[in-house]
Amino acid sequence: MRQIPASSIDDIEIITTPSARYKTDGDVGIINIKTKASDSQAFSGTVGLTGSTLGTLGFDGILNYRKGRNLFYIGATAQDIKTRSDFLQDKKTVVDDYVTISRSDGYRYRTFMTEVARGGWQFNDGKAHKLQVEIQGGRTRNTRGGYMLYNTTFDAHDHYILYKKLMQASVDYEWKIGEKSTLAATSRLRYDPYSLEYTESNLHTNEGVRTEGTRGYEQEHHWDSDGSLTFTHSYSETGSFESGYQYTTYSEHGGYTFKAWDNGAKDFLWDDSLDIPFYYRRQVHTLYAMVSDHPGNWELNAGLRGEEVIDVMDIEMDGASRHRKRYELYPSAHAAYRTVKAGTFGFGYSRRTNRPGIWKLEPYITYEDYYTRIVGNPDLNPEYIHSLEAFYRKSIGSSSSVAATAYYRHRSDVVDVIRNPYEPGITLDKIVNAGDQSEYGMEFSAVTKPARWWTSTLNGNIYRYAFISRLDGCSDNSGVTWMAGWINVFSPLKDTKIQFDSHLIGPNMLTQGHEEAYCFFDMAARRQFMKGRLALSLVAHDVFHTAKYENFRSTMSLESHTTVRPTYPNIVAGLTFTFNSKVKEKSGAISTDAGFDGKDF
């Protein structure tokens, strides 16, 4: 998503129980990003600039040229998004009756650098044929790390860098066959000719003398591609049938090498036992069919996806290679009944999955920091999720609405990270299938307009969950938690909007502990000039400095308490200029990411 220029996004849709048309990966739904299409003749475009008090810098823009049935465009995104959090962790480990108590005090950071250019051509004859061709190229560089003081005695620095060069091409075609049928094909190919995943840990005394250190290098190149062929036929004025084939393939080829600090040699020495070549490939082949109809006041949709998943992991470690093939069925069904006065009632069901990525399968140990290590699990199974919901929606006048959804979700083979002592003072995080979890609850939303200049939106979610452990080191847990947000948009002057957001996050039970509740508040202002063509915005995150993430872990051999607070203040400024394009009115909605970098440590 970070490679999609903000200037090209028109709207974002949340689909909680997707139909058979959509891919099954994801917890409970998908995010559908709708991009803009220029309708202006000759030249049009948008340019945006972004900066923040934490050092974020960003540029994105797109230039369109339309002539007749053809649209040509070029665009670029260059951004360096930075976040930072204060970090404090108290930890007690017991290894062979040896008790170690430690304190880590410092900060953690994260940056997302993207430099991507793209260009393309769209053709629409206005009758039967649509075609789009696009190419992209650039690089990304994501980093995270921390600077810590351990037990007031040692300085520890850790860094993680994931650097990629990328090239991508895509072709989309749609053919309208007569008045009732459509054939559509999509294809996308991406190649990363060079990728480096680098981890580094350093440990020095207060006097600056190095005592420990590690360097890990995972160099590789990636191929990934996806595509589809879809046929849609309207068999009546209200009904349609859709079927299609979709494929996804991803592969990476490379190797992992490692070296550690040797106090005798006063240098980093290579560990020959950790020179590990690997090859990984995942293929997903899908056939699906679905029927949609709108008889009278009803909206009906039912479908079925069949997926063949082929995983191949060849890695030069004893017993670590895996070759797997799975055949899976994913049904879905939706129904809604619309009434003029009472509103809309409906229900939906879908089966989904979370398939672990390659980094979760890698069986060798890597260093997050010197006292925290992580290892993947080649036997990790996918999560499977059954999602059932019943909903109600009603519009009140032209500017108000209410919605409520009751839901039940059951998740099997929950993927989680469990932490156990590895050596005195050092813990090892392992990715496991921890057990099964069920949730049932209620989501609600209400949009009102108390005054002509004030729009208020209240969202909430309260649910009960129950986790049943299937693994030693995890514990059964159950409880009630909630989330709530109150968004208020004020229009005190023409072309001016002010927004104030309140967010409450309830407590959360984990497989090895729990998280405390917290709240935070955001403020934003947007001013438009030149009949909306120029827009200036300011966003202040966590304005009262109340965001505070607290995590408690407790097992027979481990006790830890982690506190993370986003760096304050975090103010983001943005400037956007649009020319020769329709300007869509924006509500001023802002990000609700509290920026807890380091909460997973």
Image: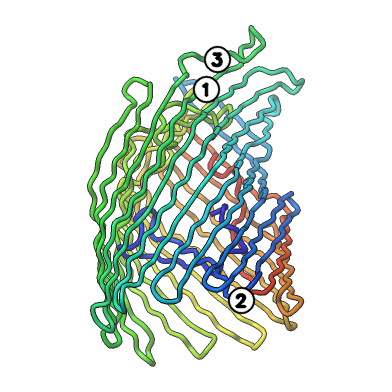
Amino acid residing under circle 2? Lys
Q: In the rendering, at what x and y percent does residue 191 appear? A: 48, 41
> Would you call the spot at circle 1 few (<14 residues within 10 Å), some (14-19), or many (20 or more)?
some
Q: In the rendering, at what x and y percent does residue 9 appear? A: 56, 65
Q: Nearer the viewer, residue 545 or 448?
A: 448
Mark 3 or 1, closer to the camera: 3
Q: CA distance from mark 3 to mark 1?
A: 24 Å
Q: Is residue 269 above or below residue 40?
A: above
Picture quadrant of residue 46: bottom right
Q: Nearer the viewer, residue 554 or 335?
A: 335
- Residue 221: numbered disc: none
Amino acid residing under circle 1? Pro
Q: Secondary structure at mark 3?
A: strand
Picture quadrant of residue 577: bottom right
Picture quadrant of residue 212: top right
Residue identified by numbered label 3: 270
- Residue 424: numbered disc: 1
